[in-house]
Image (cartoon, rainbow, N blue to C red):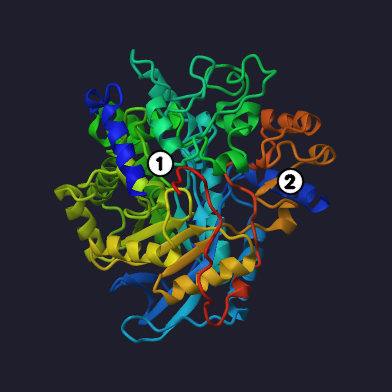
């Protein structure tokens, strides 16, 4: 392992230009109608929930004077309409609460010897692309109402909510999710003469950003290198749904462009195809640097802050909202320039500090906590190869960043969120990962730990992991991911219409295309009647995990669900 890291560093220093790039079923058909009705209506948001607030105190989550362990699942749609109807959420909330109540699990006492209790929670996806779908500052009232309804529905059954500003590999314009298409379009319009790609189009094809010399070194070290796939018979693979093409709404490129579906299906997502594209590397890097550029601050940073403010307003209105998570799995950025990529962690934590500073200036609610993730949702020390490539020794330790993070921690406003996907950015066991999280959180003060994503082959395996993490002192745990399969008729949050269902699955988990089904499905993308999407890891959802929580946690499984790049044997 050590020799592999040394080889990577040596290769990085020797890469050309390294020194100069330091700059800058029937049930599903019935559900289809109900979601479309929901999407077309909006009403004023009103406060509804009245649960006792969970707060951060002494580095733990507490309700009143009692320390709590929050247990639940991720509840994340990858595409419009972003949330199911309120009645479905209420049904799901009831099930989540009842499953936890029926489990045998009793949390171990806290570090202070005091009794702890378990309470149900969800990590609820809330995407900026949903709130501001068309332009900066123009908020979709229907989306806000749907989010409010979902939070209220969870409150009705005593379920707490972490609001997750979810995103996967930047934006629809490169096959990902999270950030709106117009943000990428602005970046491309103002890209200058250097030819950088921020969107995907015929002029800017989707391409991997890993330079050849580094790729060679990674292969020798045993790492898999992602590749972009296209339909061989397609003469113009990146035109449909691209910005400015006039062929489809660019909001839907991630689901409507068949070549994107070749690269954001389950298999491709596990191989990290999208994360290391030029589009993601360029766009996310510019996003993180946007607070320091006057025009980008106006067009990129402040609209994002407005989005986060709207999520904080949900904390104001609903006492079951625990915290707002600012980013999901922020990727390493800056490739193909290796020296720029080494600043990934530095740039990320400077960005977080700038967001917290702006929220302070705007007077956003003084008691609402934020949850923060490190690069890729992992932690320093979890993968020495990742640390070597994407982190400087001084990352996240600058005076401005540390002062801001410690200030928020001292007011009980900071939560450390982390993911556990062995093989992708993480090459330690779960117990060691928890210790790394505890060590990182201690840099800022007394900060609770939120184990916000992991996946296992079986529901029992996931339940065992949750119990083990809770007994190891983790304060909140949410598995990937909760899906009401009875409602969707699918293993994820997406629903096909009857015409598509009659032909089968349009795109398989391995990226194989069923052209008969695709011809029916694509009609729903063009007319906007599709419901959710099977992209970027949307499958393998479950509803049966919490009831299986054991009274006593068994030994931690040696292997959990993984993602494959980069890994070193």
Tell me: residue 434, above or below residue 243: below
Residue 414 percent across, percent down from the top left: 31, 61
Mark 1: give few (<14), some (14-19) or many (20+) Cα within 10 Å.
many
Residue 470 percent across, percent down from the top left: 45, 73
- Going 47% across and 28% down the picture, which residue do you hit? 208
Question: From where the camera sits, is residue 248 visible?
Answer: yes
Name the residue carrying label 2: 32
Q: For the residue labelled by badge 2, is the local secondary structure a helix, a strand or a loop? A: helix
- Going 65% across and 14% down the picture, which residue do you hit? 235
Which badge, 1 or 2, comes first in the chain's sequence?
2
Tell me: residue 146, above or below residue 222: below
Residues at marks 1 and 2, CA–CA distance in whole angstroms:
34 Å
Q: How many callouts does the rendering have? A: 2
- Going 65% across and 64% down the picture, which residue do you hit? 543
Question: From where the camera sits, is residue 319 visible?
Answer: no
Camera-side residue of 546 and 393: 393
- Going 60% across and 59% down the picture, which residue do you hit? 482
Q: For the residue labelled by badge 1, is the local secondary structure a helix, a strand or a loop? A: loop
Name the residue carrying label 1: 331
Tell me: residue 314, above or below residue 201: below
């Amino acid at each position: 392992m050590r020799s592999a890291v040394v080889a990577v560093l040596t290769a990085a220093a020797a890469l050309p230009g390294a020194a100069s790039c330091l700059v800058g079923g029937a049930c599903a058909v019935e559900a289809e109608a109900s979601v479309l009705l929901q999407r077309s209506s909006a009403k004023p948001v009103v406060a509804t929930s009245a649960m006792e607030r969970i707060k951060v105190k002494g580095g733990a989550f507490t309700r009143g004077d009692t320390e709590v362990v929050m247990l639940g699942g991720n509840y994340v749609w990858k595409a419009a309409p972003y949330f199911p109807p309120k009645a479905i959420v209420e049904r799901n909330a009831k099930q989540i609460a009842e499953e936890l109540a029926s489990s045998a699990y009793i949390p171990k006492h806290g570090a202070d010897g005091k009794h702890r209790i378990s309470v149900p929670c969800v990590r609820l996806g809330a995407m900026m692309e949903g709130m501001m779908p068309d332009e900066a500052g123009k908020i979709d009232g229907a989306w806000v109402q749907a989010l409010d309804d979902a939070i209220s529905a969870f409150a009705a059954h005593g379920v707490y909510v972490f609001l997750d500003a979810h995103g996967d590999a930047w934006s629809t314009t490169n096959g990902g999710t999270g950030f709106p298409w117009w943000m990428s379009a602005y970046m491309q319009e103002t890209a200058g003469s250097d030819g950088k790609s921020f969107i995907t189009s015929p002029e800017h094809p989707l391409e991997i950003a890993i330079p050849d010399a580094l790729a060679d070194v990674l292969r020798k070290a045993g790492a898999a290198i992602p590749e972009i796939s296209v339909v061989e018979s397609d003469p113009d693979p990146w035109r449909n749904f691209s910005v400015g093409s006039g062929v489809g709404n660019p909001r839907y490129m991630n689901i409507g462009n068949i070549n994107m579906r070749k690269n954001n299906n389950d298999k491709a997502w596990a191989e990290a195809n999208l994360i290391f594209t030029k589009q993601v590397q360029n766009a996310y890097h510019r996003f993180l640097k946007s607070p320091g550029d006057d025009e980008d601050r106006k067009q990129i940073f402040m609209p994002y802050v407005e989005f986060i403010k709207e999520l904080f307003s949900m904390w104001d209105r609903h006492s079951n909202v625990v915290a707002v998570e600012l980013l999901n799995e922020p990727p390493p950025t800056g490739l193909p320039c290796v020296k720029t990529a080494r600043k990934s962690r530095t740039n990320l934590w400077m960005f977080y500090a700038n967001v917290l500073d702006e929220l302070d200036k705007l007077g956003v609610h003084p008691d609402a906590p934020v949850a923060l993730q490190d690069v890729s949702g992992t932690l320093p020390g979890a993968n020495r190869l990742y640390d070597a490539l994407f982190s400087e020794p001084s990352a996240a330790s600058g005076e401005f960043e540390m002062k801001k993070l410690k200030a928020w921690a001292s007011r009980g406003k900071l939560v450390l969120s982390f993911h556990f996907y062995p093989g992708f950015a993480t090459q330690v066991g779960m117990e060691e990962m928890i210790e790394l999280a505890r060590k990182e959180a201690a840099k800022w003060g007394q900060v609770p730990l939120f184990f916000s994503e992991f996946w296992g082959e079986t529901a029992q395996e996931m339940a065992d992991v949750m119990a083990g993490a809770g007994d190891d002192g983790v304060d909140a745990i949410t598995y990937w991911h909760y899906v009401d399969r009875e409602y969707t008729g699918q293993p994820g949050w997406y629903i096909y219409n009857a015409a598509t269902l009659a032909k089968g699955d349009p795109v398989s988990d391995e990226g194989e295309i069923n052209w008969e089904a695709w011809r029916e499905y694509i009609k729903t993308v063009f007319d906007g009647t599709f419901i959710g999407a099977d992209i970027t890891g949307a499958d393998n959802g479950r509803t049966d995990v919490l009831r299986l929580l054991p009274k006593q946690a068994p030994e931690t499984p040696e292997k959990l669900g993984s993602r494959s790049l980069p890994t070193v044997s």
